[in-house]
Amino acid sequence: MILIVGGTGKLGRHLTHRLLGNGARVRVMTRDPSRARALLHAGAEVVTGDLLDQESVKHAMHGVRTVISSAHSVLGTGRNRSAAVDGTGQRTLIAASESAGVAHFVFVSASGASPASPIDFFRTKAEIEQVLTASALHHTIVRPTAFMEVHTYELIGKQVVNGKAVVIFGKGDNPRSYVAEQDVAALIVRVLDDTALQGQTIEVGGPDNLSTMQVIAIYEQVSGTKARVVHLPLAIPRLMSPVVGILHDGIGRVLRSIVHAETTTQTFDASSLLTRFPMPLTRLEDWAREQVARQSSAIPADQSSRAS
């Protein structure tokens, strides 16, 4: 039995459908089972659980041999703030996995995870990597770069396609790696089948490094829509993040991340990844064209995900 924590997220859905397609038994732990109805109908077992509830985590572990943790709370606040879910919650999951005798634990971390990161989310990811490495679990850590589904489409492409203004901070000329969630899912499935990868940390990113302005140009091209771009100075999120963070921890974190993304190296060289794992990596232009075509033909996104 494979337990996926974070299975109702986009990456988790890709993972669940791929594993079910391979004939695996999959259990999805979620706080809200109503969000997992499609996964239940696809053949997954669904169990109610919360990383902040130790008993529910222990219950979800019954009969589990493999755990994949892709849950996170970047935008969380209050009880579900990042420090609680990404920190305390992941520690609880690791401890429960040890107690249950789990054979393999796969942790979805993040590219840039480091104790020295100026972003607390990445510091927390690094802390959990260290906890996992110090545990008795056979484990693999996967570090994806920014997901193109969120960082290019939700934040940029959707606005271009719908004819709305795209607001960006700074010049938007800092190149960055974007990776498709379906590619990360494909890599994780391969990790599960290769015991030689246990104990390793695998960085995964997309085939291209693109600036925000290049991302906008791609969506202009595939949609045939001229973007209305509004540039605001980076000083705005830099000055606002401490104040906003008091009111909403998650939004303050996003503002800090915007500054970080535009002022530090965010590129990825895919050559070493492809040498180790010969696999197709999705180019943003191809993914964006498919996304726009899907919208035009009114195909539900979840249906497309199930087919991948």
Image: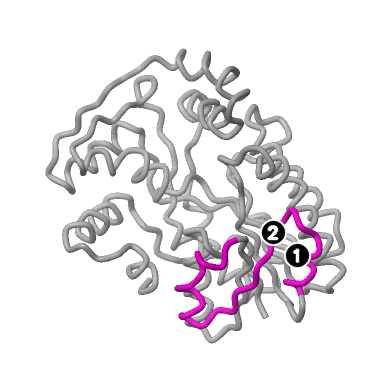
Percent x, y for residue 104? 73, 70
State the image quarter where residue 70 is shown: bottom right
Q: Is residue 186 visible?
A: no
The kind of secondary structure element at disc 1 is helix
The kind of secondary structure element at disc 2 is loop
State the image quarter where residue 105 is shown: bottom right
Q: Residue extending furthest bottom?
A: 23
Residue at 41 percent of width and 28 percent of height = 174
Q: Is 88 in front, or is 24?
A: 88
Residue at 79 percent of width and 53 percent of height = 91
Q: Amino acid at mark 1?
A: Val
Percent x, y for residue 17? 47, 74
Q: Residue beneath label 1, please? A: 57
Q: Are marks 2 and 1 in contact (CB under 8 Å)?
A: yes
Q: Which residues are magenta?
A: 32-61
First-in-chain label (2 vs 1)? 2
Percent x, y for residue 34? 51, 67
Query: In the displayed structure, does residue 44 sit left or right of residue 118?
Result: left
Residue at 84 percent of width and 60 percent of height = 95
Residue at 52 percent of width and 63 percent of height = 8
Q: Residue beneath label 2, please? A: 50
38 inside magenta stretch: yes
